[in-house]
Image (tube, rainbow, N blue to C red):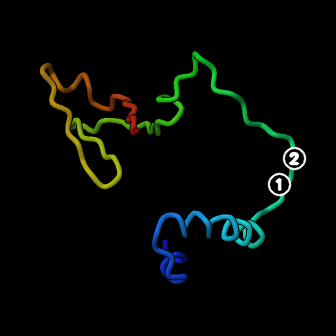
Amino acid sequence: MVKLRIQQICPLEEANAFLPAFIEKFNIRFAVTPKDSHNLHRRVLLGDNLHRVFTITEESALSKNLIFQNRDTLYQVEAGRQIYTMRQAKIVIYED
């Protein structure tokens, strides 16, 4: 952390002692009062699938050559059957 380096704080004990004052100053400078003070957080239930919650999904379609793009990379699907049946097929890309 740059702030620790500027203050020349090296051992972990000194950093832990410095932290409360830093957090207080940081919060004074950057804290924002919420528009609605109602707390909308909820507990994680046993049946909640956190892997699904924290997965980014994007829909796409295959080209005539069974190619799709994710970010800046092109991918081609290898098909073991007639490729014309998969042209323009809708796909979902899951990214953890």
Residue visible at 14% across and 19% down in the picture: 81
From the image, which quarter does the C terminus lie in?
Answer: top left
Q: Which mark is residue 37?
A: 2
Question: Quick one: SS at disc 1?
Answer: loop
Relative to residue 27, is residue 36 depicted above or below? above
Which residue in the structure is indicated by mark 1? Answer: 34
List x then y, in percent, for residue 84.
21, 26
Say which quarter of the image contains residue 28.
bottom right
Residue visible at 62% across and 70% down in the picture: 18
Q: Is residue 49 left or right of residue 32?
A: left
Question: Quick one: SS at disc 2?
Answer: loop
Is the residue under label 2 in contact with that under label 1 (CB below 8 Å)? yes
Relative to residue 31, is residue 59 depicted above or below? above
Please state which of residues 83 and 35 is positioned toward the viewer in this rendering: 35
Q: Give, as a three-letter code, the residue at label 1.
A: Pro
Say which quarter of the image contains residue 83.
top left
Q: Residues within 10 Å of mark 2 (few under 14, many from 20)?
A: few
Please state which of residues 86 and 25 is positioned toward the viewer in this rendering: 25
Residue visible at 73% across and 72% down in the picture: 25
